[in-house]
Image (tube, rainbow, N blue to C red):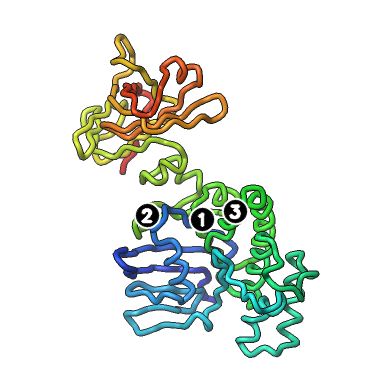
Amino acid sequence: MNNATTGLEARIGLTVGSLSIDVGIDVAPGELLAILGPNGAGKTTVLRAIAGLSPIDHGQIRIDDSVVDDPAHGRFVGPEARRVGMVFQDYLLFPKMSVLDNVAFGLRATGISRSVANQRAAALLDDVGLGDYASGRPSALSGGQAQRVALARAVAGRPRVLLLDEPLAALDVRTRAEMRRELRRHLDSFDGMRVLVTHDSIDAFALADRVAIIDQGATVQVGTLAEVTSHPRSRYVADLVGLNLIAGEVSDGHLCTADGTVVVVADAASGPSYAVIRPHSIALTSAVPIGSSARNVWAGTVSEIDRLGGRARVRLDGQLTLTAEITLAALDELALRPGDEVFAAAKATDIEVYPA
């Protein structure tokens, strides 16, 4: 009976500067997990820990049946001995090497003969549609081509784990969309565990099976993109999907925030909770609304206005930080400008509440 376990299990604890990281992720064979989070959240450090470039202070990292980092038991496997390939954000191709030698570099470093390494590298370049560029230098490549070379180099050693650190970030918008489709096609042929760091929810939606949200060095939420966006558990996730997220304590039909702001809600159980208000459920007025059926009214100051097609998103600072979505006609009627004082109203029945 085969009791072997497969997959990536990483419990990563380490301190980098002032940031303490305590993150746990699991990735099954053939699965792609996208790690999202704001700048400085610790996303790249997590990848570096899995690759063996940043040894952890506590926790454990296991790839299939092999423990590759376990400080408590004095176990650390160096990056060259882990079955891990990595595509760096800036690709880090060697400028003085040919494209072929870049892809073959890792293979030759493991002791494989030059002829075998070159043969495998040439086949990989053909797979990514760059066989004709084998003798050229990286400086002659476009951003999308450099990304494909970096990907070919990362998978040349037939790793079990493929790590991608913002692989599309260096591309312009037009190239990014095209390369996202190409990257999906190439990643589909990799049957190991795949971890993608990105700040772009579109990348996650197009490429990932599940997402892990990391904020301030901690795992905030893990699930499919639909699960995470339908019940956001951090301000970052709420902003990512354009929702207003309010945390507080529910009692007797009221959610009270830490600073004492009250939100009237409907049919909500008592206890620590999150309230989600969709931007289109918020009405804006220049004076306190009279005779409105909305049971929630908050004063705010307009800080940003973004026009999106036939509608506008208006961000407010005040008792609550809110984003409202209104028609352009309503925006013109209110004659809103940044700095204006307004009132935001929302019906209790339009507010979704779920346990924290």
Marks 1/2 in contact by CB < 8 Å: the verdict is no
Q: Quadrant of the N terminus?
A: bottom right
**What residue did someone put label 3 on?**
207
**What residue did someone put label 2 on?**
215
* Residue kind at label 1, given as amino acid type: Thr
Percent position (x, y) of residue 241?
47, 40
Q: Quadrant of the C terminus?
A: top left
> In the image shown, does 349 or 108 lie closer to the viewer?
108
Image position of 9 (left or right of 125): left
Query: In this rendering, which labeled residue sits more in front, label 2 or label 3?
Result: 2
What is the distance, in whole Å, between disc 2 and disc 3 at their CAs?
A: 21 Å
Asked if 97 appears above or below 328 in the picture, the reply is below
Image position of 354 (left or right of 3): left
Report how many numbered discs are placed on residues in the image. Answer: 3
Q: Residue at x 53, y 71 (%)?
A: 6
In which quarter of the view is residue 303 placed? top left
Crowd tier of the residue under label 2, counting other residues whose Cα lies within 10 Å: few below 14, some 14–19, many 20 or above: many
Task: Look at the numbered disc 1 and give the secondary structure of its residue.
Answer: loop
Q: Residue at x 37, y 74 (%)?
A: 56
Percent position (x, y) of residue 268?
30, 31
> In the image shown, does 351 or 259 lie closer to the viewer?
259
**What residue did someone put label 1 on?**
198
Q: Residue at x 39, y 21 (%)?
A: 283
Image position of 255 (left or right of 16): left
* Residue kind at label 2, given as amino acid type: Asp
Residue 215 seen in this snapshot: yes
Crowd tier of the residue under label 3, counting other residues whose Cα lies within 10 Å: few below 14, some 14–19, many 20 or above: many
In which quarter of the view is residue 300 placed? top left
Crowd tier of the residue under label 1, counting other residues whose Cα lies within 10 Å: few below 14, some 14–19, many 20 or above: many
* Residue kind at label 3, given as amino acid type: Leu
